[in-house]
Image (spheres, rainbow, N blue to C red):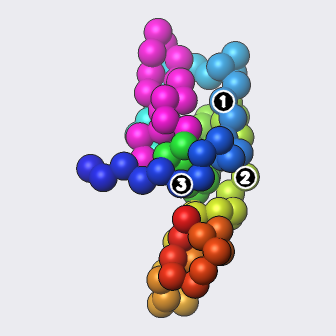
Amino acid sequence: MMKHKYLRNVVSLKLNAGKCSGCGMCVNVCPHEVFEIKSGKAQIVDKDSCMECGACARNCPFAAIQVKTGVGCASAIIIGKLSGTEPNCGCSGDDNGCC
């Protein structure tokens, strides 16, 4: 699987380990393998691969995950799909794509 990296150290993703039960739902729904379960709890292992789609937060039954959805590259991909155009979040400084 190709690993996409977006902008480093800008992702809004946060995990409250105290609320995490280790159910693994975040691992199951994350399209970019940002999480893994270690010692019975979820851990963020690749934060810069997060595209802020929000699947993890929406599917966490314990509200242990927070992320601002609809920003950055996830927004660009969704808008591109809906409009039939290439993804473009504007962060690359040109009109030729995302990041």
Q: Which one is nearer the viewer's eye here, 14 or 5? A: 5
Estimate how packed mark 2 is, as few (under 14), some (14 to 19) or many (20 or more) residues with alpha carbons within 10 Å.
some
Residue under the image location 54 percent in, 29 percent down: 44
Q: Which residue is mark 1?
A: 15
Extent of the magenta region: 32-47
| Residue type, numbered disc 2 | Lys
Which sits earlier in the primary sequence, circle 1 or circle 3?
A: 3
Label 1 or label 3, whichever lies nearer to me, is: 3
Residue under the image location 52 percent in, 24 percent down: 42
Q: Which residue is mark 3?
A: 6
Q: Secondary structure at mark 2?
A: loop
* The furthest residue to the front: 93
Which sits earlier in the primary sequence, circle 2 or circle 3?
A: 3
Q: Total marks drawn?
A: 3
Label 2 or label 3, whichever lies nearer to me, is: 3
* The furthest residue to the top: 39
| Residue type, numbered disc 1 | Leu
Q: Which residue is mark 2?
A: 68
Q: Secondary structure at mark 1?
A: strand
